[in-house]
Each structure stands twice: as C-alpha cells, then as structure tokens.
Amino acid sequence: MKAKQHFLERNLLKIQLNEFLANELTRAGYAGVELVKTPLGTRIIIKAARPGLVIGKHGKTVRDLTQKIEELFHIENPQIEVDEITEPELNAKVMAQRLASALQRGVHFRRAGYTVLRRIMNAGARGAEITISGKLTSQRARYQKFRAGVLIKAGDPVNHFVDVGKATVLLKPGMLGITVKIMLPEAPLPDEMKISDIDTSEIIEESGELEETETDAGEKSIAEKDVTHQEETSKNN
C-alpha cells in the first residue's frame, strides 16, 4: 500500500469513528478521539467531560462500545481508554453539545446562547463567539451571533489558540446548526508586549562601583595638580 493511500484511509477511519462516538456518547460530553497503533492492537483514547458515562456500571458501556467498534470498523483488538477533560467550559465541542442539549429541552436560543457564553468567559477564556443558524423565529432561516472578549480570526495564531466546535440539533421548525469558537486563556497575541522584571540590586552595585571609580579618579587628578603646583613654586623660588 502506498503511503498516501495509507494516510487517507487512516484519516477517513478517524472521521467515521469520531461521528459514531459523537452520536453514542452525547450525554457523556464527548470531545474527540485519538488513535494510537500499538503492537497489541489499536489504542482508542476518548476525551469526555463525564468519563463515568463512557465506562458505565462495572465497565458494561465500554465493553459494548468496544464490541461495536470492532464489528463496524474492523479494528483489530481495540483498546479503549477514557481521558477526562479537566476544564469542559474551555472545550468548544463540549460547549456546543451542551448548547444543543439546552435547545433540545426547549430553552430559548437567546437565553441558552448567553448562558453558555457566560460560562465560557467565567472559565477564563480570552474571548468567545457562538453562532446559531437555522429557523430561529420564522420560516426563513437566519443566524444569531453571541460575542464576548477578544477573538482573532486571521493569521497563524488562529490555528493554535482558537478552539472550534460544531453541533446540530433537530427541532420542530427544522435543523439548527451551532458553532462555538473559544480563544484559550494562554493565547499570546502578536501585538502584545511583555516587560521583564529587572534586578535593581545589580544596578545599585554597578552604580556604587562607578561612583567609587569616579571618586578615585577625581582624587588622583587633584593630587597630580598639587604636585605640579609644588614643582612650579620650587622652580620660581
């Protein structure tokens, strides 16, 4: 198999597995999956906000999930591991799914959008943007945006410091699309300047040495002038 074909098939498998797990683990706060090839098989690392729902009572849910993955995707000896998300409010996929769940329960889209936005900003995010699109108030589709803080949209920092999550929810008027963008707290902006702390003790010591040097030089020049004056006086006498 060519290397190009190998990577294409591997990425396609990851996309299909990601969609399957997103549907199966909606209540668990599913946030993504990673595939790691090992000599014993394939290790599947599932990121979730509520790992207890992924594992299930006495591990029943994770065993059923392993069996389904092996049958549907033909993955040899899958080994599932669950990685808990410590700060779900800073994960765009989790917050998009939470917003979708709120809309599914009948919460008004404006109230749900501002609630999720407030939780994101209270968690320490530098900025966030939530977009809900679809038939919100009439039969004509439109979109509503909720913004707070600073969110960059261009340049290389977007690829590293802006987390994007998407979700969909089916309501009576139709399908609604949700996009959540979060600018992480540690995101450094290119135009920001940081002033380093200066150790003033070294400056004081250096200035003290400089003053001593200047004093010695002054005393030396005065002594030289006195000697010269004495020599001239002796010659005149």
Image (cartoon, rainbow, N blue to C red):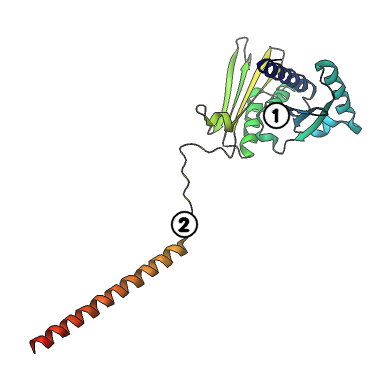
Say which quadrant the C terminus sits in: bottom left
* Residue pointed to by mark 1: 94
| Residue occupying the point 68% across, 29% down | 95
Q: Nearer the viewer, residue 140 or 127?
A: 127
Residue at the farthest left position: 236
Judged from the image, the secondary structure of the residue bearing numbered disc 1 is helix
Q: Position of residue 56 (x, y in %)?
A: 87, 30
Viewed as shown, does residue 130 lie left or right of 233? right
| Residue occupying the point 12% across, 86% down | 233
Residue 198 is marked as: 2
How many residues crowd around disc 1 within 10 Å: few (fewer than 14), some, or many (20 or more)? many
Q: Position of residue 127 (x, y in %)?
A: 56, 34
Q: Is residue 167 above or below residue 193?
A: above
Q: Is residue 233 above or below residue 179?
A: below
Disc 2 residue type (three-letter): Ile
How many residues crowd around disc 2 within 10 Å: few (fewer than 14), some, or many (20 or more)? few
Q: CA distance from mark 1 to mark 2?
A: 43 Å
Does residue 3 appear in this view?
yes
Viewed as shown, does residue 105 lie left or right of 180? right
Residue 77 quadrant: top right
Q: Position of residue 111 (x, y in %)?
A: 65, 27
